[in-house]
Amino acid sequence: MSHGHVLSPRLVKAYLDRVTAPELERIGITPSSSIFLIEILHHEGISLKELSERLLVDKAHTTRMATKLIESGLVKNTAEGHQYSLRLTDKGKDVTHKAVRINSDAMDELLKDLTPEEMAVLQSVSEKVSAVLRRS
């Protein structure tokens, strides 16, 4: 199978980071932290282990990001002791909803030239690839 013109995930991430960073910085976050916030929004009460697994990043990175988000007042830990149950604060919800819109607008711009049929194929392929990644 030839992969000569396969879309590089690194290229897509670099584009999205470049496009979203200025707007995300205006609301006080980075592209990296927005991904964590959005995942917490969709999975209120998520543990560090679950967050690491869902985002496919190591637990040390997740712990550092969670600590940063807690210290910035965007996330709270509602568990006791060394456990984590991460939830967005009201400020975190406001910022995260803005981040969702910023990221969505950037994706819309990236994909604007695709036909509805191409979008359907992209969605289908993305779901299959995501399923493989989550199993690994």
Image (cartoon, grey):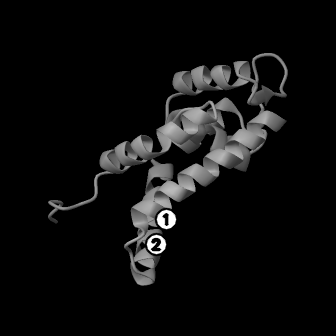
Q: Is residue 120 above or below residue 81?
A: below
Identify which amino acid the numbered label 2 is placed on.
Ser
Residue shown at 43%/47% (left/top)?
16
The secondary structure type at the circle numbered 2 is helix
Q: Determine which residue is flagged by label 2.
A: 124
Residue 81 at what x, y percent from top left? Answer: 81, 16
Q: Determine which residue is flagged by label 1.
A: 127
Near-viewer residue (123 or 72)? 72
Identify which amino acid the numbered label 1 is placed on.
Glu
Q: Is residue 48 above or below residue 101?
A: above
Which mark is on residue 43? none
How crowded is the residue under tag 1: few (<14 C-alpha within 10 Å), some, or many (20+)? few
Q: Is residue 125 visible?
A: yes
Near-viewer residue (53 or 104)? 104
Quadrant occupied by the N terminus:
bottom left
Image quarter for residue 4? bottom left
Residue shown at 56%/33% (left/top)?
25
Residue shown at 49%/38% (left/top)?
22
Residue 87 vs residue 55: left or right?
right
Residue 44 at what x, y percent from top left? Answer: 77, 43
Residue 8 vs residue 132: left or right?
left
